[in-house]
Structure formats: structure tokens, C-alpha cells
Amino acid sequence: MTKEVTSRRDETAAALDFLGRHAPFEQLSKADRQLLAQHLSLKQYPAGEVIASPEEGAARRLFIIKQGRVTASFRAGSAEEGFWDLGRAECFPIGALIAERPVSVVLRAAEDTLCYQLKREDFDTLRRRSPEFQEFCTRRLASLLDIALHDVQARLAQPGGGATLSSPLRNLVHRAPVTGAADTPLGEALTRMQGERVGSIVAVDDEGRPRGIFTLHDLLGRVTLGGVPLDRPLREVMTPDPATLDGEARGFAAALLMADRGFGHICITEGERLIGVLSERDLFALRRLGLAHLRRDVGEAVDLSALAAVAEKVPALIEQMLAQGASVEQLTDLISALNDHVTRRAIELVLAEQGTPEVAFSWLGFGSEGRREQTLKTDQDNGILFQTPPGRTPDEVRAELLPLATRITEALSHCGLPLCTGGVMASNPEWCLSAEEWADKFTTWVNRADGKMLLYSSIFFDFRTLYGPEEPVEGLRQWLLGMVREHRNFFRRMVDNALGTRPPLGLLRNFVVKKGGDTPNTLDLKLNGITPFVDAGRICALYAGVSETNTARRLRAAAARWDLDEAAVDGWVEGFHFIQLLRLRRQREQLQRGEEPSNRIDPDRLNELERRVLKEAFRQARTLQRQLEQFFQF
């Protein structure tokens, strides 16, 4: 055996060991990983040497960094700007290889760097052979995010956990439903439920379509307490038109329906025919806490102390949901939905205590609540919209509503939603306004577009109804979308303001962190992490006339109207969601230790994969900002 053969085998073994310890290569099959290792060559680049640049023509090699650091920068005339770092196990330039085009950035060794190289033809071969590698190449951030999310879930998951929320509902149905006709005597229905050991029976028609459901909860509330004879037909005590979902829907759809409506059972259908019933226990196998129970407890809270006790359970539920497979978007949706219910119940309790005012009002949520993006650290951002009755002035109505609004904000604070330190609350006369006054506010902000007005825009343009009539609020929204579209100077100022908040990627290191103070070596995941995405989503939605307030849905809807590249939009949304994931996890850990939750994180405490994904998420924010800058060149 020659020395050359031995050396090549050693190099292949070293490459194989490296690939097996880093995503996404660890996800490849053993055979595909072996093939990749055999075709890699290793090259050293001294500090400052250009590895790839736009002038070289179509990309010819894939680079995988084994050791060292590579900077990427955009050409701007004779200068280079927009640096970010690539580190160990990161690979480039995948997009250019797939599109058969030159790289769009200058890639330079920031220090002495070792890179594995793969020829283009071998890169194409591996993509054809390996579904995992092809998935990574076409959905790089999504692929890494999936791996990171699965890692988080694995650490949170409890032994014996139930089905994941990403599963189709039809896969979660493990037995035929117990059914009967609507005229089945109640006693017979109860006998069947006891014999089958189930908590529900569904009344179906001749075609097998669900027409009503009767549960053990109904037995107590409607039969036992109501004194209903057991010879009465099921139709008299069942819940008509039960909640249904198609079997192709995912587990989270049932979770959100249970949380939103307080249901403990969901009928699963194929077409219109009943194929099964899922209870909350079937879906989540949660030992301590359930969505429907939590939702019902909120609705049945008899006073604010009881409501506050229920609200305290939300973090534990979110932890379990994350372990069960819920996505970040689903989790923030769920937190917002539960906080919505807490808010509505608090308002109902205060109205029962103080009386209902003569003038109907809409309670508005702003900021993260308005966007349905709340995490475990949130405060109140709310206001009131009312219609001024004939013969009365806005000031007179406001005087009637303000004491009520003050009591409601105090109640919400008691339930774990702290008062806004900036005074953005309905108890502030400035934010308890008639529809006409709100329109005047928006007009002033759009026309002036200075620093304070832009701050207000970042808060108040993300509004939605939490309680009361929705029609006046939606009327205000449609008016705003029509009015703002013609104010180009406002959009230019909003874009300039948005570009002033840059993701914390440094020129000479991976992250720009805080120096000194109480939280040294940390970065703010809210201010510098999600804010660039949120600001861009708001601007795009306003300009495109999109009614959505949620950031991800704003970006998708605006991109669809402008026919933007779907892969680029997916990257923005996935980057945004990963930062939200880190926020949720950080806040959950702090709450478990009895600490005040925050948005600051030390990137050195993340594992290697999480740091890679976070860097990529910040790069996506920069890419989105560049898109924003180019699109709004008025």
C-alpha cells in the first residue's frame, strides 16, 4: 500500500468524522456522507485572500469551512460593505451553484482558513442522490431551523409524550367513533359510552355526517344538574353542529380550535363523513394541563384572582406545546389567543362590577398583541375606539369611558400583563378616542413623519379588535390603507427609520454584543433581532394595501402581490421565527428560575448549530433590508 493511498484514506476518514459532527451533513445517509467525504479536497487560504468573487464567473465549487473564518461583503463602487461572517461547518455558495451564476458577494478569508472543496459536478451528483442534501440546498435556513427545533423539542419532551402537533389528524385517530342517531334515548347513549369507555358520543345522520356531540361534561351540566330524564332523546342535550376538522389538518389546528373555543373534543371528518373523535387527552397526552381546560377556566373565572391564577399557567402550557412539536408561529399565535381570552374575560368581569357604559366601545390591541406575536415577556399596549352618538361630544364619551378603562388596565396588570411604562393604554385620554379622532391621529403621523410620529406608527399601525364591535375598527383600517398609499414621503421616512436598526453582525466577529453594564456580552433579540423583520413587514403591508397585522403573513401577502421569489420570502420568515424561538426559550428558562423574563441573550451560550442558524437569521434580516432599500427608491 503506497503512502499516497494511506494519506488519502486518512483524509477521507478525517472528512467523514467532521461531516458526521455537523449539520446538515450529519443528516445524510452513511453512504451519501461517505461519497461526499471521498470527493472533498482540502485547501488553505491565508488571511485576506479572496476565495470567491463575482468577477470569477459562474461558481465552480462548494466550500465547507473546516477551520477559520470567511467574511462576505457586497461591492459598492470601489469599496466593500455589508460584512458578515461565516464560520466552521458553514458552506457557500449554494445559491450560485444551483443557479449556475457568479457569487453576488466577495468571500474572503478573515484569518488563516481551511476549506473543504467539492467540484460542481460532484455537488450536482450529491443533490440528485441525497434527498436530505437537496432539501438543505433548496431550503437552507428552514433545514437548519428544523434540526435546531427538533433538538429543542428533544430536550423538552417527556418520556411517553403524545403525538406531535405536526401530525395529520387522521393519523391520530386510533379507534372508530361511538355514534348514534339524534333520537337515541339518553340512557342508551350513556350505556354505550360506559361500555366503550369513551367520553363522548356523536349523533350522526344517515350519511355519517356529525350533527351533534354529547360528552361527560354535558352529562354533568345538562343532565344531572338539569334533572333531565334518561328516556329523553339525545338531541335535547347534545351540542348541535359540533366542531369539525378535516383529517388532513394538522394537530395544531385542533389545538388552536380547542384553545379558542374551549372545546375538549373535535370531530374528524373525511369529506363530510365522521371518521373519528379526538379528545384533548388523545391529542396532547398532557398530564398536568390542557388547552381546552385552560380556555374554559378563563371563561369561567368568577373574579380577577381566579383569572390571574389561570393566566399563570400559560408558560407551562407553552413549554409542553413546544415539546409536542408546535412551530414558533403557532406558539406565538397561541399565546396571543390565550391573552385575548384573558383580556376579554377581564373586561367582562369589570363590566359586571361597574356596569356597562351607554356607548359601545372597541378595545384595541397594539404592538405585538396586535400582530399576534406575543412571547412570555409582554406588557399592555391597548386603546379604545368609540363612535360618538348624536348630541354628545367625544370629550363627554371619553369622560364616561376613562374610569372603566383604568379599572380594566389595572385588572389586566393583576392578571400578569404589566402596565405599559410608556402609557400606551386605554386609560390614557390620548388613546381613548372616537373613530374620527383616531383618523386625525393617523393623518398627523403620516403627514409629519418625524421621529416621534414614526415611533407611534410602529406601535399603533399594528392594531386589531380584542373586545367589542369589529366593524368600526375594520372601517378605520381600510380608510388608513387607502390614505397612506399616496404619501411617498412617509414611506421614505419609514424605510430610513427601519434601516437604522441593523442586525447585530459585526465586521470582525460573529455578533455585536453589549459591552459592560448589567448584561455584558449579550444582544437584544427584540430590538436588533425581530424589529428589522417587523418594520419591513409593516411597510410592505401598508404599501401593498394588505390588511394583515402579523409579520409573517404580511411578508407573504405583500410578496404574493409583488410576485417576489418564494424562497427569499421563506428565508425571511424562517429567520424571524428562529429568533422568536430563542426569545421564547430564553424567557421560559428565566421564568423557571424565578427571574424576570428578558429579550437579551449571550450568543456564546448557544450551541454551535444555534449560533449558525442565528447568524443566518440575521443575514436574512439584512437581505430583507436591502430588498426594502431597493424597492422604496422614490
Image (tube, grey):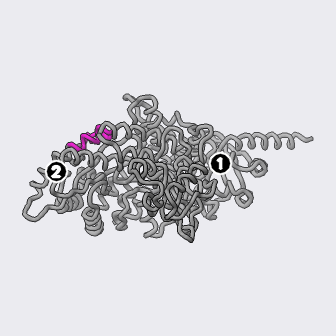
Residue located farthest toward the left when viewing the structure as drawn: 391
**Position of the N terminus by quadrant:** top right
Q: In the figure, residue 103 lies in which quadrant?
A: bottom right
The x and y percentages for residue 393 are: 9, 59
Q: Is residue 124 left or right of residue 431?
A: right
**Circle 2 residue:** 401
Cβ atoms at labels 2 and 1 below 8 Å apart: no
Relative to 34, residue 564 above or below: below
Question: What residue span does the magenta drawing correspond to?
Answer: 407-422
The x and y percentages for residue 509 are: 51, 39
The x and y percentages for residue 583 are: 45, 42
Amino acid carrying label 2: it is Leu
538 or 271: nearer the viewer: 271
Q: Residue at x 7, y 63 (%)?
A: 391
Q: Is residue 416 magenta?
A: yes
Amino acid carrying label 1: it is Pro
Q: Earlier in the sequence, mark 2 or mark 1?
A: 1
Relative to 523, residue 502 above or below: below
